[in-house]
Each structure stands twice: as C-alpha cells, then as structure tokens.
Image: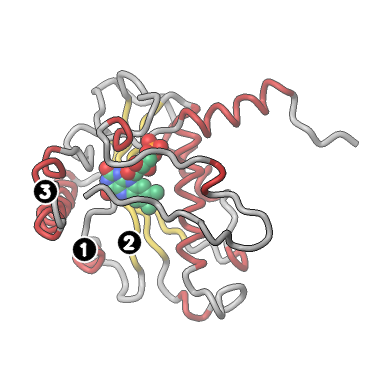
Amino acid sequence: MNHRFPQDKIDAIYEAIQARRDIREFNQEPLPEGLMDRLFQAAHFAPSVGYMQPWRLLHIKNPKLRSKIAELVEHERLTTAEQLPSRQRDFLKLKVEGLSSCQEVVVISLMHGREAHIFGRRTMPEMDLASASCAIQNMWLAARAEGVGLGWVSFFDPHALADLLKMPRDATPIAILCIGCVDSFPDKPLLDTLGWGQRLQMADVVYTDTWPENAKSTPVSY
Ligand SMILES: Cc1cc2nc3c(=O)[nH]c(=O)nc-3n(C[C@H](O)[C@H](O)[C@H](O)COP(=O)(O)O)c2cc1C
C-alpha cells in the first residue's frame, strides 16, 4: 500500500515549513472565517510525551488583560536590553512582539499537575515543554498555509503572567502568540536581515555518529 501523499500535498508541506516566518507586524484585514478554531485543532493534534497533552490555550479576548500582557512584555524587553553586553540600542530598535497590531492573542501554557506524568519524562521533565512547542509549531505552520501571520513572544516573566491569568501555581505559560493578517511574509528571518544571526550550514548541524571535534556553536552577535 502506498502511504505517500500526492506530490502537490508533499510540496505544500515543505513550502509551509520553509515559508513560515515569525511575524511582528500585522494589518487590520479580517482573519479567515473559523481560523482560530482550526489553529486550536492543529495545536491539539500535536504529539506529546506519554500522550500527556500538556498544552493549555488561553484565548485572550478581554482588552484590559491584553494591555496588561503588553505591559509585562514591555517591562521584560527593557530589562533584557539592560542586561545585553552590547548592542542595547540596536536591540531596542528591534520589534520583538506584535501585540499592538495583531488581531488575536493566545497564551500557551503548560498544564498544572504535570509532575504526576513520568511516562517519558522521568529523566527529562522538560519533555512537557517540548510537547507544547510541537503544538505551537503546528499552529505556526497551519497559520502560514492559511496566509496568516503568527509571532511567538517569550519576553515575559512567567510568574507575573500566570498571576495575571489566574493560573494554578504549577501551570507555566511558555508563549504569547500574536496572530493576524500580514501585508507580506519576509523571505528570511528578520533577525537574519538585521544582522543578528544567519542560518547555519547544514554541515554545522547534522553530524554522523559522534560529535565532531571541530563542531561549531552558534555565534552570538550582541
Ligand atoms: C521559543 C521561541 C521563542 C521566541 N520568542 C520570540 C520573542 O519573544 N520575540 C520575537 O520577536 N521573536 C521570538 N521568536 C521568533 C524567533 O526570533 C524566530 O523564530 C527566529 O528569529 C527565526 O525566524 P523565523 O521564525 O522567521 O524563521 C521566538 C521563537 C521561538 C522558537
């Protein structure tokens, strides 16, 4: 039996992977009908360690909450700038979130009660984070295929955000997602275009058998 997708569907999958971008600038066009439900479904079909499905998706609709979230992000952005060894000015010019122009905001959190789940996590408890990250990537790719931008924002104090959203003590927010329509999708990551990094060569990231003696780490540019 042939389990292969038709070639045009295979091409579409690779195209979504390569054309996906982190988006921080949105226009005000309406989102496609039913988009948010489809993105939530895409997230919920992600793989997860021990099938624990640790993701919890908080769709932020209250404008007051949204502006408080934006304040937390701004506070963290300024704190990060203070701690950079150099290039603070360049950093402060960077757009690191699209909260003011996006249409929808979703906070992705790890669920409470995770410690009871040891299946696949006994030696690596962070596999819950890995699983929820798969859910976010599903949303990111689905949004790109729908022609919609999505940006992952991680500039926030998780405890402050958890308090704001009345989360249980052991639930941990890991992402603020900004979602909206875009004028265009850049060909390259913004941080690449602005000289903060470049895509590594395949040979620098794919090894055979053992770790090469001359293996490079990713250079830091700040
Ligand atoms: C875990 C994670 C956290 C991120 N946090 C932020 C963020 O807080 N602000 C931001 O502007 N981009 C954030 N990004 C986006 C990255 O900067 C972006 O993925 C990277 O520069 C490559 O660009 P691309 O996603 O367009 O390919 C994050 C991405 C990941 C995977």
Pick whichever of labels 3 and 2 is earlier in the sequence. Answer: 3
At x 59% / y 55%, what residue is drawn?
Answer: 47
Q: Nearer the viewer, mark 3 or mark 1?
A: 3
Query: Does 88 appear above or below 50?
Result: above
In this view, the residue in front, 2 or 89, is 89
Q: In the rendered image, is residue 177 in sight?
A: no
Residue type at numbered disc 1: Asp
At x 72% / y 23%, what residue is drawn?
Answer: 7
Residue type at numbered disc 3: Gln
Question: How dense is the environment of label 1, judged by Cα within 10 Å: few (below 14), some, or many (20 and up)?
Answer: some
Q: What residue is disc 1 on?
A: 157
Q: Nearer the viewer, mark 3 or mark 2?
A: 3
Label 3, secondary structure: give it. helix
Q: Residue 27: which quarter of the image?
A: top left
Q: What residue is disc 3 on?
A: 88
**Rendered location of residue 200, percent (x, y):** 45, 42
Pick whichever of labels 1 and 2 is earlier in the sequence. Answer: 1
Residues at discs 1 and 2 in contact (Cβ within 8 Å)? no
The CA distance from mark 3 to mark 2 is: 27 Å
Q: Which mark is residue 173?
A: 2
State the count of labels: 3
Q: Nearer the viewer, mark 1 or mark 2?
A: 1
